[in-house]
Image (cartoon, rainbow, N blue to C red):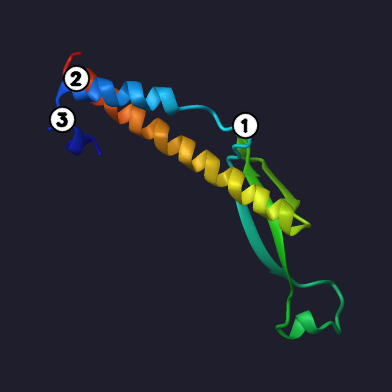
Amino acid sequence: MAKKLRGVTSPALRESRAALLRQLCVPPNALRASCVRQFLTCGKLNCRCRRGHKHGPFYYLVQCLKGGAIRKFLLKTPEQRQRVRASIAAYAQFQKQLEELSNINTELLRRSE
């Protein structure tokens, strides 16, 4: 993205930054996590999952925390899964906007402005 910004005038960059800052807000439902689908085997020796027909799918919310810890919990309902996916998408969109703001600020700094 930085190469694309080199051909843009400084006033246009400042206007883009101002417009981005006007629309930028932290989504209240933002989640830095993943929604993971898993098929599992149980501990029963004669269960069909031992012959390739695993149980599931089960959906989990997975977060990597500080110090390498992982938080994981089961999403039991389709509504939970839908909310989690929307929250993950909101976080990704916010990160994309922050990246754009950072690129604009970097280019303006490069120009000593």
- In this rendering, position of residue 76 left or right of residue 97: right
Q: How many numbered marks are there?
A: 3
Q: Residue at x 53, y 39 (%)?
A: 91
Q: Residue at x 32, y 23 (%)?
A: 17
Residue 68, percent across and down? 61, 40
Q: Dividing the picture into quarters, in which one does residue 47 lie?
A: bottom right
Label 1 to label 3: alpha-carbon separation: 33 Å
- Give the labeled residue for mark 2: 11
Identify the mark nearer the N-term, 1 or 2.
2
Q: Which mark is residue 28?
A: 1
Identify the mark nearer the N-term, 1 or 3.
3
- In this rendering, position of residue 80 left or right of residue 10: right
Residue 41, percent across and down? 76, 73
Mark 3 touching mark 2, by CB under 8 A? no
Label 3 to label 2: alpha-carbon separation: 8 Å
User: Looking at numbered disc 1 in the image, what kind of residue is underneath it?
Assistant: Pro
